[in-house]
Each structure stands twice: as C-alpha cells, then as structure tokens.
Image (cartoon, grey):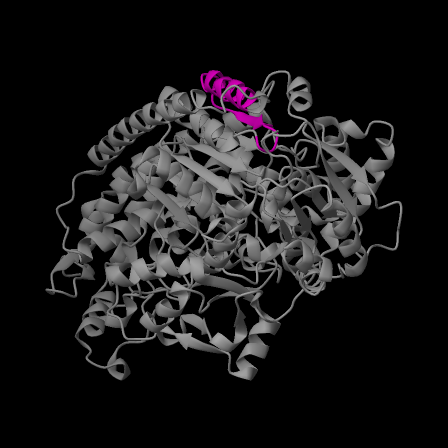
Amino acid sequence: MIHTDYIAHIREADGKIQTVYEHLLAVQEYAEQAGAKIGFRYFAGLAGLLHDLGKNTEAFSTYIQQAVSSTNAANAPRRGSVDHSTAGGRLIHARYHHKGTEHRYTAEWLANCIISHHQGLRDYISPDRTSPYLERVEHRELKQYEDAVEEFFRHVPPEKLDELFAYTIEEFKQYVLHIRQRRLPPIVSTLLLKYLFSCLIDADRTNTRLFEEGKSEVPDASSQIADFAHKHHEFFQSSYDTLISHIHHLNKSPEANKDIQRLRQAMSEQCERAAYRPSGTYTLSIPTGGGKTLASMRYALRHALETGKDRIIYIVPYTTIIEQNAEEIRRILGCGDLILEHHSNVVDDQDDERTAEDDGEVYETRRKRLKLARDHWDSPIIFTTMVQFLNTFFGSGTRNVRRLHRLVNSVLIFDEVQSVPVHCISLFNSALNFLQGIGGSSLVLCTATQPALDYVKNELRLSPNPELIEKLDDVEQSFRRVKMVDLVSDLPSGWGAEKIGDFLQEQMDEVNNALVILNTKRAVRKLYQQLKAADWVHVQGIQIVHLSTNMCGAHRKDVLSGEHGVIRTLGRKRVICISTQLIEAGVNISFECVIRSLAGLDSIAQAAGRCNRHGRDLLRKVYVIRCADEVLTRLPEIRIGGEMTMDVLREFREQPEQLLSAKAMRLYFEKYFAMVKQKMQHPIPELEQNLFDLINANTYYKDSYCKRNKIQTDLKNTTAIATAERYFEAIQSHATPVLVPYGRGAELILDLNGEWAPGSDKLGDLLREAQLYTVNIYKHEMDELHKNGDVYPLLHGQAWGLRDSAYSLEYGLTMENEGEWGVLMT
C-alpha cells in the first residue's frame, strides 16, 4: 500500500484539500467538548475519530476527485457509490464486541453512530426480523477495508485506539451506575445514544462547513467552549439586570397597587427565590394572567447564572404565540440578535450538509441548498415549539438530532405544557427525565392547568416539592375573577348558531364586549355569518371579529392588536370576537364575557383567562355551552375532553368556585388520561405496536428475531430506532405551509418567485419574514387548491404561494376543514 494523505474534502472555491486525518482530528475534538457535558467525552470523541475512516482508500479518492471535476451530472459518479461510513463501525465492532457485556454495549453504540452519520441511526432489530446494524458491521462487502484500517493505524496506533476505547468503557460504567441508582428505564439509553450521535453529527457538519467557507484555521474547541460560556454568562447577567429594572418600573406604575398586580409581583419574587434551588424538574402554576412569561424568565436568568447553564429555551405549544413571546422578551431585554425563534418554515428545511439518502459525499454546486430561516440552537435564548422539541429527540434522519446536545445543561421552560400531544406523552416524559437525570438541565412546567404528567404509566419524575409558587390554593382564590356557569346541562343536544346569537344579544345588554370560542373553524364561520346578518348587531353598532388558523399569523396579529384590532377597540367600544381555541394561549386580551363550547377543562380554564384578565371587575361570567354545529369526528381528544369535563362539572356542582382549582384540574387529567392511556405511547397501527416500546426494549421484535433465526442474539441493544423515527409524528395533521397574499405576503410571493443564488443572506431574511404570512394547509385542501389552480410553486417547488382568489380578508383561506389543533403547533 502506498502511503499518501487521503482526501476528506475538496473545497469548491479553490480546490484546496482537507485530508482525512485533519478532518478526523478536528471532528474528534469538537465532539469531545459536546460529549464532555454529560460525562461522555471519550465516547463522542472516538466516534468522531473513526467516522470517516473509510475515506482512506484509493476508491474514495478517485470518487471525490471525479465528483469535483465533472462538469455535467451525467458524467459524475453515482451518489454514494463508495461506502465510506461503514469501515469505522466495522473496526470497532470486530475489535471489541466479543469481549464482554460492557464492551458489547459500548461497541454497538459507537458503531451505530459511525455507520449512520449520513442517514440516521440504524435499527438493531427491525420489524422484518432482521438486523440492519449487523448487516452493516458484519456482512456488507467493503472493498479496500483492510487498506483503510492500515492507513488509520498509521496515524492512530492500535494501542492508542485500545486506550481510547478503555476510557469509553469507564464512561459507560459510570453511566450504568447512575441509571441503576435512579432506576431509569431502557429508553434513557436510546436517548443517550441519540445524544452521542448528535455530538458526532454536529461536529462533522460544523467542521465540513468551516472548511468549505475557508475557515480551516479554527480556534481549538476547548477555547471556543470557554469563550461561549463567558459570553453567555455576561449576556445572562446583563439581561437579568435589565429585566429586574423593567420589573421595578412596573411596580411603580399606576397599576402597581391593584390586587392583581400585587399578586403578580409576589409570584415573580417567589420565582426569583426558587432560582436558587438545585437543578431539577419543577412546576410553575401561575394562574392565567399572572405574568408567567416575565416570572419564568426571571427564574431562568437567575437560575442560569447560579448554576452555570448554557442557554435558556422556551418551548411553547403554538406557532401563533411564539412571535409574541419572543417579541416581548426582545422588547424588554433589547437583544434581538441573541434571541432565536425556531419553528415551521415556509420551505422544506432539510439538513444543511447531507441528504437523507446520501451515503457518500455530494459535491455539486446545487447541493448548497437555500439558506433557510433556521439555526442550530447555539443562541443563549431560544424560542421554539413543542413540535421542534419532540422532533429533536424522535424525528428522522440527521437534521433534527443534530441540535439535541444543545439541550443539556440548559434551563427549559415549557409554556402551556398541558398541550403536549396525547400520543407523545410517554415520549415527552422520557425526554424530560433524560434531560434532567442525565443532562443536568433544569425544567419548568409552566401552566395554570398542570396536566398530572406524574400520574401516567411512564411518569415524569418531578423534584421534591416541585411547585415554585407557595400556598397555591390561596393564590388561586386571590386570583379568582370569573364565575363559571354550566349551561351544557340545560340543552344536552347543543346550541346552534341562532341560539348562541340570541344568548349573545342578551349578554350585550350588560357588557361592552364578548368572546366566543368554538372547537371548529366551520362552526366559527357559521356563527360569524349569523351575527353579521343580525339586525340587532347593526342597530347597536357592534363590531364582529373572526379568528381562525385559516388566517396567517400577520393577519391574526392585525385583527388582535393592529391599528383596528380587537385589543385597541376594547374598553367602551362594542365588540364580539368569534374564534377557535387559538386565542386561548399566549394572547394578552381581556373580555367582559366569555362563552366557551364544551372541551377539556384545561381549554375552558384557558378561555376563562381571557375574561376579566386584569381584575378590573369583581367577577365576570364564563359560560360553558355545547355547540350543535361542531363535528368532532376528526377531533376525538376534544370530544373525550368534553366528556371528562362533564364528569368534573357534576362532581363540583356544589362547589362551582373550585372548578378552576388545581384539585379540579388534577381530577380532570386523571380521568382524561385514564380514557386515552392506550394512545399515550404513540401507537403504530400498521405494526400493531407502539413507538415507545420500539425504542424502550423492543421485546416483541427481539423475541421474533430470535425465533426466526433460531438463535439467542448476542446484541445488547435491540431497539428499532430507525423504524420509530420513520413512524414518529409530533402532530398528525400532514399540513403544508403555504405563503398567502395578505399584506406584505403578496410582495414576498413576488420576491420568492424569482431566481436566487444558493445561500443568499437576503433570501434567508425573506424566508424568516415569510413565516408570518403562511397558512398550514391539509393534504385534501392542497389537492383541491391544485385542482382549482389556486396554489403554485415558488423556489423551484420548495415553497408554495396562494392566489388572491383563495384568500379572504374576513376568513383567510376560503376553504373549510374541521381540523384545528395540528396546524397551530409546528
């Protein structure tokens, strides 16, 4: 074999070569720093050192040079025609897997990370009773494998590799001791494997990008980490000082002496005191309207300073409120460029550096994709959605998992945590248990309607005395500003639009404004049309407002708080707002009367939070009705939630003032979770299994594999990770984001309909702005829009635009659909 410096990458701009050894050392160092955060420095580093070992061959050198020199695609070598990712995994598996239990576990984790760094982690045992993992590390034909290993050992002697592997064994032993002490379930090991995979993926992609950008002389990883920690600490300190100054200013305002404001001050101060508690999993049950955004940020900043946390991450349920919360924090802290928002994009946000099917290297100009409005979560404060959080742990491929390592040693605030999708509850609890128990993060479940996640089968492990607010019962009573009125029992068949209109006419004789929240867009639109046509509405000069997710975010924002929006017109002006449940979370608005169609008690409590929000009146009424115009076939969780709410209403009939208490809410969730317990582990009907089991122990398919092959497998890991990722859906809406011609959206459609250079910064800015002007559209609606010619491709089919004829200033998208929950959350 001729010794040479084999090629890892060839820079497109100037043809400069990065050798395999240079790349491996750089990735090792970066991965080590990420792995060290949870005690797996050598493990992550060894994965980095071995991941591209297979590039040490003449075959790969020929492949990469041909790929770069080919001027047309027809002459370029076939993508992935040279397998370079299997060799490192095979070396680890062959050299160490036979040596005992600890060696087997460690070798299997390392090898899976290495062989999977282009496509996502492999199944150890799949539903088809095969082992994709073993097929790669034991059976796949690898040309020039021995040459690649020999070249690797020329740089890293075998005894050095053995020494590094021995260090990984020690890290594994410490981990086993830790999980046994805490009695953590097997799924934690799967999440740890994903964490280590995240370290490798981010290190590999980052070094590749830096080389391609000409930044080959990069500061060593340890100095970068130290610099990062220093800058974040300084930022947290200055942000904390600014926030406290803002809070003191609020305390001196004319509103400061009001009872509600004094209660907000007291709870904010309790959050400050709680920030000195150890890292853990806590609840923050501030009543709706209690100022939880500022109080939780106060906790997060103080706690980050006290415990040396890397970042603060806000996870909210709905895209409709993420901009509002982030904007409020930016306005107060004055640090817009250091606060990242990450949620659904107008374009398909594929991985920056790899395609899912790519098992080789792609060196095409067009492969430099559009720079999307997405970062890798390296900002000190991040606002994201529950969907993005869950995708980080359970989504497919390498795009999502890349940012997982950013979540450890952080403060995570889960706003409106009761909105966790039911089918993801077991997965969500496991992710939080991992982040706290293994990752050292502090977690705060922030909601007025705590969902009893410690009650379910795969429970969330809360810290001792988890509630951050003292004497919660007294706070609830002091914060009471509405009276719940049950009208469901009066007419079990439900109220139609006409009946609701008549009831509203009676209420508007006593109040200036009212909010009606119904469960479906169709029912909202029907009631809106009924009221618009009613004579009494015109005689009294009442403004009727419509809100639903058929309207883009900018449209809803204008309706709520724009120049002619609801917030600006409340007070003495006459307004009735008809909305879906999107108005229930994160919208700082207060009505004198609220009518809520029957749903889960948590939703009703959130609706009540839009009534008499600031306590200007002693008590105002919230009416619970059943709407006859709702078809809940596609919304079974709302239907079941309504039934459980009826049970709670009956049990508290003699204590209506307690209907929104923590006691009533826990009773509701215990009843509700008992009804939906079969759904909590993400069922997969096609497999007649559930996703939780696939990545917890995978017992069913493990046993089937052994019976089919008539062997007792020596694999220590038997999970079906790739299968689980393939079936995982945080929301089951199958919606597509479409840019709509509302306001600035019309100009953005024109701007994005032209040609753009790959990676254009201006394009990235346009895509960020476009998020406010998108509507998520279901597949059957997209099919209808295509059929009518109302939707057309932008950016060569990577985004979609809507024609003017399909968007109304009253309703938004003019098609109707009963689904509502899913499109809020991405």
- Residue 303 percent coordinates (x, y): 42, 23
Q: Can residue 821 be seen in this view?
A: yes
Quadrant into which the N terminus falls: bottom left
Q: How many labels does the image show?
A: 0
Nearer the observer, 711 or 325: 325
User: Among all residues in the image, which is located at the extreme front?
Assistant: 539
The picture quadrant where one finds residue 281 is top right
- Residue 800 percent coordinates (x, y): 44, 72
Say if 589 sits above or below 367 in the image.
above
| For residue 347, side relative to residue 817 (left or right) | left
Nearer the observer, 4 or 403: 403
Q: Give the range drawn in magenta.
A: 261-289
Within the magenta stretch, is there residue 457? no
| For residue 472, side relative to residue 66 (left or right) | right
Nearer the observer, 740 or 810: 810
| For residue 688, side relative to residue 383 (left or right) | right
| For residue 680, side relative to residue 102 (left or right) | right
The picture quadrant where one finds residue 495 is bottom right
Say if 311 sits above or below 548 in the image.
above
Q: Can residue 107 be seen in this view?
A: no
- Kindly identify the residue that appears in the image at 83 percent across and 37 percent down: 649
- Kindly identify the residue that appears in the image at 46 percent across and 52 percent down: 562
Within the magenta stretch, is there residue 270? yes
- Residue 743 percent coordinates (x, y): 41, 64
- Kindly identify the residue that appears in the image at 65 percent across and 38 percent down: 611
- Residue 257 percent coordinates (x, y): 52, 19
Say if 397 sits above or below 338 in the image.
below
